[in-house]
Amino acid sequence: MKRKTENPRVVVIGGGTGLSVLLRGLKKQPIDITAIVTVADDGGSSGRLRSELQMPPPGDVRNVLIALADTEPLLESLLQYRFVNGSGLAGHSIGNLLIAALTEISSGDFVTAIEQLSKVLAVRGRVLPAANHSIVLHAEMQDGTIVSGESIIPKAGKRIKRVFIDEGVKPLAEATQALREADAILIGPGSLYTSVLPNLLVPGIVQTIRESKAVKAYICNVMTQPGETDGYTAEDHIQAIHDHVGNSLFQYIIVNNGEISEEVRALYAEKGSEPVTYSEEKLTAKGYHIIADNLLVYDKFLRHDATKLSEIIMNVIGAKV
């Protein structure tokens, strides 16, 4: 039964652009949002700050904070701005540098830094790293070779067999608490092996999700990702999650059934990307409820329709809380 005095509590797990797009739609809904974000990034500005300052990578956190923020367009542009000159500054975004500075001001406490910037940006919800320290992501390829580094794995040019993280990683207590209290848990969209699975591989995260009485849904990517999910169907995405953390982690699978124009297909094909298809029969046979709709928006890039996706999610939540 839906609570009369509280908004539904929704936890979203992922990273990258897909998560940010989803959150831009969800923040307009009457819900309490917690975003659990990967800390496995080791490329670009995030990788440099991670290495030089011994702090978790701020890039995915920055994007999620901005997605959930109630800010003027100019401030958003400022936080996303990357320096193009300067031997030390070139490539760094102002948002990443702000998070790095706040982390040092907070005596190295990354979570406190995020909380402080959330207040400044009037963020509608909470943003939490899956762990309060960096995670090193490794991939075993089909040929048996091991590739280490989130930014390097998709560039290896080999098919991924599995990904794994080092032992000793501990989940952030606030993250597991949010999962325990959630009315709904959403996984994805985002890069399967380098955004979604790194969060699920943090010890304690999957166990807490399984124990939760929340409604749970996986939001499948619209397009395959070169170097990660070449040729993958929705069933392949699900199977990869099964292989890493077991089955029956969620009840619903949200997939796109909208048509993509030949022109857009051709543009993505040049980059080695193609639409993610699905088989209703195969997914249903695995015990999942399928929600299929035209979820596409195209503006230079294909994205999930944040408004429509958030409405679908609210309908699922409304039937359960």
Image: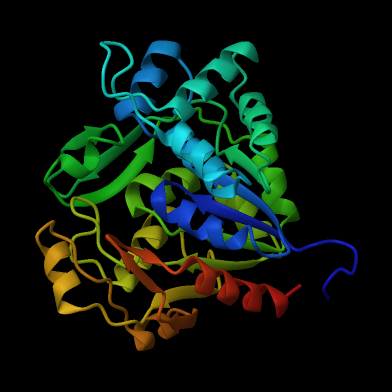
Q: Is residue 107 visible?
A: no
At 21% across and 44% down in the image, what residue appears? 154
Write the residue at 65% across / 35% down. 118
Q: Residue at x 32, y 79 (%)?
A: 278
| Residue placed most toward the observer, 236 or 53 | 53
- The percent coordinates of residue 37 (x first, y second) are 52, 42
Write the residue at 59% across / 36% down.
171
Q: Is 81 situated left or right of 263 in this image?
A: right
Hey, which residue is sitting farthest bottom in the picture?
Answer: 281
- Which quadrant holds the C terminus? bottom right
In this picture the colour scheme is: rainbow
How many callouts does the rendering have?
Answer: 0
Can you say whether 32 is above or below 255 in the image?
above
Q: Work out whether residue 284 or residue 43 is closer to the camera in this orientation and state it.
A: 43
Q: Is residue 81 above or below residue 88?
A: below
**Residue 179 locus on image (x, y percent):** 67, 51
- Quarter of the image that includes the N terminus: bottom right
Residue 157 visible in this rendered orientation of the protein: yes
On screen, residue 321 above or below 92: below
Front residue (pair 303, 247): 303
**Residue 10: which quarter of the image?**
bottom right
- Residue 308 location (% of width, % of height): 51, 74
